[in-house]
Image (spheres, rainbow, N blue to C red):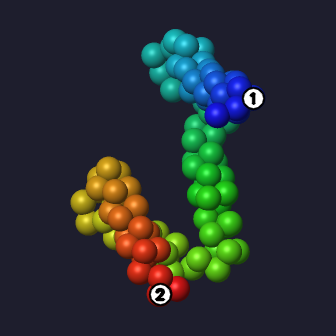
Amino acid sequence: MSLHILILALMVGAANWAFRYGPTRLSRGAGQGTGPLARFLSATGPAAIATLVVASLLPMALAAQVVPLIAGVASVVALWLWRRSVVIATLGGSLAYALATMSGTF
C-alpha cells in the first residue's frame, strides 16, 4: 500500500470522526434545538446516506451489472421489511449480490 493512500485514509477517517463527534460536543443543552444549525445537522445524515447510495449504485448501473445490483438491493429491502434488522439486511444483500455475480447469468 502506498504511503499517500494511507495518509489520505487517515485524513478522511479523522474528518469523519470529527464530523460525527463535533455536534455531540457542541449541543450540550437538554432540549432539541430549532435553529438553522440544528436543522442543518438533522438533514446531514439522510443527505449523506442518499449520496453514498447514489455514488455506489450508479457505477454498477452504468457498467451493465444490473442483475446483481437488483438482486442485492431487492434483498436488502425485503429483509429489512421482514426483520427490521440492518445486520441481516446487509448480510443478505451482500450474499444475494455475490450469488448473482457468481452465477454469471447477467
Q: Which of 18 and 99 is in front in this view?
A: 99
Does residue 94 appear to the left or right of 48 in the view shown?
left
State whether residue 98 appears in this view.
yes
User: Nearest the camera: 60 or 43?
Assistant: 60
Question: Do callouts 1 and 2 mark residues in contact (Cβ within 8 Å)?
Answer: no
82 or 63, which is in the foreground?
63
Q: Residue at x 52, y 85 (%)?
A: 106
Of residues 2 and 96, the one drawn nearer to the viewer in this rendering: 2
Q: Position of residue 10 (x, y in %)?
A: 64, 24
**Residue 99 x, y percent position in the rendering:** 38, 73
As drawn, 1 above or below 92: above
Instruction: Evaluate whether residue 81 shows in this view.
Output: no
**Residue for point 71% across, 26% down:** 3
Q: Residue at x 62, y 45 (%)?
A: 48
Amino acid bearing label 1: His
At 62% from the left and 52% from the top, the residue drawn is: 52
Q: Name the residue under label 1.
A: 4
| Lower position in the chain sequence, tag 1 or tag 2 | 1
Q: Which residue lies furthest to the front in this view?
A: 1
Dot 1 surroundings within 10 Å: few (below 14), some, or many (20 or more)?
Answer: few
Q: Name the residue under label 2.
A: 105
